[in-house]
Image (cartoon, rainbow, N blue to C red):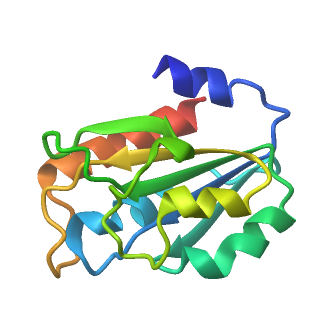
Amino acid sequence: MDRIRRLLSNKNLRIVFAGIGNVLRSDDGAGPIIAQKLNNTENRIVIIPEAGIERYISAINREKPDLIVFFDCVNFGRHPGYWELIPINKIVETTSHSHNISLHKLAEFFFAETWVVGIQPANIEVGEKLSPEVEKSAQEIISLFNSI
């Protein structure tokens, strides 16, 4: 959490928050659900590409962000609901793949420092509800990001 506070503490930074994932695949929808509940301000822009991040590359770059933070389902091999902020270049092929391009490859298309808040899913089967563990983590992330 200290890393998040350090990244977001400069109110002059222009930040794009993007929620990635498929809301019809249970916990894979955590990214868009989180992004929908973040405060949108002049310097904090929220974009919700869901499973179509590839179509939002130019829209994100057009915002001229200093920092990009993606929210996505990531298989860390940890307990459901575990979450972590990591640099996008540290993501190998651990996303849930509801999008057509890996986040690691995606990083090559952005001109700003880019991070991922990854959340370990419990379930990515068809469904529109988050598991209790992921729901709890999503609420924690929303509260943390909106409080900074």
Task: Report the quarter where the N terminus lies.
Answer: top left
Q: Quadrant of residue 53?
A: bottom right
Q: Is residue 37 in sight in this rendering?
A: no
- The residue lying toward the viewer, choosing from 7 and 89, is 89
* Left or right position of 144 against 134: right
Is residue 29 visible in the rendered image? The answer is yes
Residue at the spot 67% in from the left edge and 75% down from the top edge: 56
Is the residue 124 above or below the residue 143 in the image? below
- Residue 27 in picture, x, y percent from top left: 24, 63
Residue 29, x across and y down, in percent: 33, 68
x%, y% of residue 48?
Answer: 56, 70
Q: Is residue 104 above or below residue 4?
A: below
User: Up-down: is 79 above or below 121?
Assistant: above
Picture quadrant where residue 60 is located? bottom right
Say left or right for 135 vs 34: left
- Location of residue 26 in the rendering, given as x and y in whole percent from the top left corner: 21, 70
Residue drawn 23% across the image and 76% down it: 128
Residue at image coords 15%, 58% = 131
